[in-house]
Every structure is written in structure tokens, then in C-alpha cells.
Image: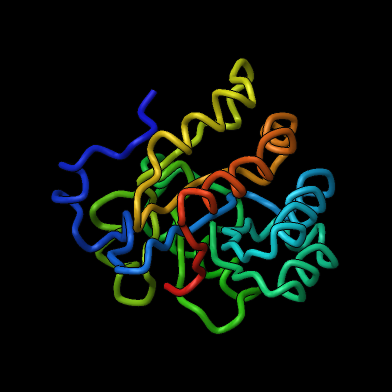
Amino acid sequence: MLVKTPWFLRILYPSVIWRKKNENNNVWLTFDDGPCPIATPIILKALMKEKIKATFFLIGKNIRENPELFKEIIKQGHVVANHSYSHRNGWLVSTKSYLQDIEKCQKFMPKNSLFRPPYGKISPKQLKELKKKYKIILWDVFAWDFLKKISSRKVKRNILKNTTSGSIIVLHNNNKSISKTHKCLTDIIQELKEKKFTFSTTW
């Protein structure tokens, strides 16, 4: 279970954004998969309490089913970005079908070009086509918060142990993860602040 993305992947796929170089001790907190009627309000409440902004990589199908939550994320000043319409694994579908699914989600998006592949899986051909239009955002800290047997303490440790300046951190905005996330999100943010990290949504 890799929490920290191996350095060689960043070298093999340099056109993908794995982390963000900066001199201000910034980190990028991101949430995948929502909007979710249970998870999203809890996450938004924690972010508002701590007065920070995050980036939400959202699934088009979930946006269609939860339009008011989608509007609320934007209203609170967070960045919303494309996580495809139906969360397909790029390794298992044709490039044409994959690109169509992404474009279907993009219709919901404000004018930005941020995309995160579901499961982090994307073929070389898909990558070649997508990078013409999108900034492809992956990560260098993956919390594994959606795993059934992982504890909130372990999620917290995964993030705090591996975050450095420029890190892109992935948590999830869904029913599988929120039982852990709601117990530790505020603590994670506060401890990162204590380590003098600041939170950015500038891509």
C-alpha cells in the first residue's frame, strides 16, 4: 500500500502533475468522487471551520444527482474539477469512450481544465489526447481512506508522515471514506498548519 508516490513515476510521466514546486510551503488538499449527500457537508463544515480552501474532483453523475451540493461547494470558494462522468477505469475502456465520458462531465465545470483520472489509471494514448486540453492532476500523498479496515488514526498518519512542501494530498468524498475522514480531517488540517504548511488551490 503505497502512500507516497514513487519518484520514478514522476520521471516516467512528466506531463502529469504529481506535486507542485513552490517556495511558500504550500500543499494542495483534494477530495475525490463527490458530491455525496453524507460526506460533502461534513467535509465542507471542517474546511469552513479551519478557514481553508480545497479542490474537489467531482464525478458528473454525482453532480447531476446532487446539484445543490455542487453549487454549495462553489459558493464556499472551493475549486471544482473533472473526475469523469461515470468513474471509468481508463485501462479497461477504449480511448474514444473514455474521452467522451470526460467531456460529458466537463459540461458541468466552470472554466478550468483540471482533470484527475479515476483510480489514477490512464493509458498512454488517453494521456496524449487529454494533455492537449487538460492539466492532468495526480498526487504524491494518497491516504487510502476508503479502505474498509483502515482506521482514522492510520489515515491521519499516512498524510502527516508523508506531506512535504508541494504535496498534493488525496482524500475521498464518499460513503466509504467519511466514517474515517470525519474523525480526523480537522486534526490533519490543524497539524499541517502547526508544521507551517499553507493550503493552496492555485493550479
Asked if residue 91 lies left or right of residue 87, the reply is: left
**Residue 97 place in picture, x, y as percent:** 46, 57
Q: Which residue is at the front of the view, 34 or 61? A: 34
Q: How many marks?
A: 0
Residue projecting furthest to the bottom: 111
Dividing the picture into quadrants, the one containing residue 21 is bottom left
Q: Which residue is at the front of the view, 76 or 192? A: 192
**Is the residue 15 above or below the residue 123 in the image?**
below
Q: Residue at x 65, y 70 (%)?
A: 78
Task: Tell me if residue 35 can be seen.
Answer: yes
Residue projecting furthest to the top: 149
Q: Which residue is at the front of the view, 169 or 106? A: 169
Task: Tell me if residue 121 can be seen.
Answer: no
Q: Residue at x 14, y 50 (%)?
A: 11
Q: Which residue is at the front of the view, 182 or 128? A: 182
Look at the image and tell me in which quarter the C terminus lies: bottom left
**Residue 80 place in picture, x, y as percent:** 61, 68
